[in-house]
Image (tube, helix red, strand yellow):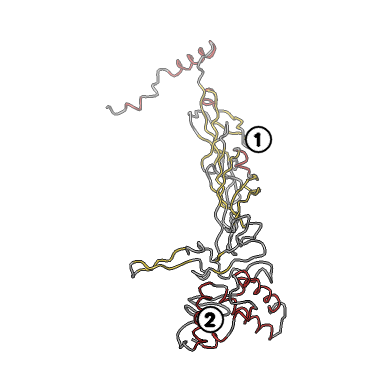
Amino acid sequence: MNNEWFEKDFYKVLGVSKDASASDIKKAYRKLARDHHPDAKPGDKAAEDKFKEISEAYGVLSNAEKRKEYDEQRAMFSSGAFRGGGGFGSGRTGTGGFGYGQTGGGGGFDFSDLLGGVFGGGARTRSAPARRGADLESETTLSFEDAIAGTTVSLRMSSDEPCPTCHGTGARTGTVPRVCPRCEGSGMQTSASGGVFAMTEPCDVCRGRGLVVDDPCETCHGSGRAASSRTMQVRIPAGVKDGQRIRLKGKGAKGENGGPNGDLYVTVHVQPHRLFGRKGDNLTITVPVAFDEAVLGAEIAVPTLNGSPVRIKVPAGTPNGRTFRARGKGAPRKDGTKADLLVTVEVQVPTAPTDDQRSAVESYRAARDGADPRAALFAGGA
């Protein structure tokens, strides 16, 4: 231990009495920090040294445990009973020490965590871990036509966002959070299990934030997050399928402490169409054809989704259920081309034929001359 640390009167440095409250110490420090901060007096070596001195003092006196140790060991040093040992240090510190600037494995204080609100307009959270925002889920229902053509939908989203009052710090306006003394800003703590294994888990003091709020924000009560609603215009690409999940990167909840935003996932539901179906990127339609058209052949008009009919040639002798392909009349593909329209014919048989129709069919039966269309089923015996 360096004895000169205990020769310093940190109370005198901050201009407070030895029985000063934590609030008085913080108030004195903030006033001195404003007066001597290097940003306020660039190039002033004396101001920089003074700022280091008051930061040293506040780093000790702002922490109840360190203040107690300082008071006890300073009393021992003053009485001559103090001899060596570990304790205070300067610069980068190890376990159990105090220091100006960054800390090592143990205690320590970084004035930038407290003074961000004084110079720069917000609390710096060097020690608070950055966290990615939560992913959000939403759903939308489209008409069949909009799913094929693509459209823009309006989505109302609700999520936890940085509190608008404290801007995510969790601290009341005019105050700033301090680095968690347990995890030293990492947000994680290590606990031993049976003396052999060590487990890392979120700090139970700061609950993984890395910061401790002494004077919580009146809006978010110290959490730094608040419920927020927003309306988003989301573009649904052409050719989307029923049940497809679309990812919108960075459109989810906002991250914490500089972390990236989460993603938004939109599940699309497509309403059925009265005429058209879908098979992959191809559209499908079933078209009725008359008995004579199937037998003698015909050219028929088939509707398409864009409203312009396409002509399909049905050759003579077309059986029921045969499928024809109208190229380029299907859904858009990812490569910019269009799939096809699959046209399946359904031969219509009169359910209540007129006398003329019956007579014509009877003539056809006579012309068939008794040929059995099922004869091939029985060829070669049982």
Task: Name the residue beneath numbered marker 2.
Answer: 92
Residue drawn 57% across and 73% down? 62
Disc 2 or 1, which lies upstream in sequence?
A: 2
Circle number at residue 307: 1
Marks counted in the figure total 2
Residue drawn 59% across and 51% down? 159
- The correct choice, above or below, for 112 with respect to 241 in the image is below
Q: Is residue 122 left or right of residue 365?
A: right
Amino acid type at circle 2 is Arg
Name of the residue lying farthest toward the top: 355
Q: Position of residue 213 (x, y in %)?
A: 57, 63
Name of the residue lying farthest toward the left: 382
| Quarter of the image where one finds residue 171 | bottom right
Q: Position of residue 309 (x, y in %)?
A: 64, 34
Q: CA distance from mark 2 to mark 1?
A: 75 Å
- The correct choice, above or below, for 233 with respect to 178 in the image is above
Mark nearest the camera among 2 and 1 is: 2
Amino acid type at circle 1 is Gly
Circle number at residue 85: none
Check disc 1 and report its element: helix, strand or loop: loop
Q: Position of residue 182 (x, y in %)?
A: 49, 69
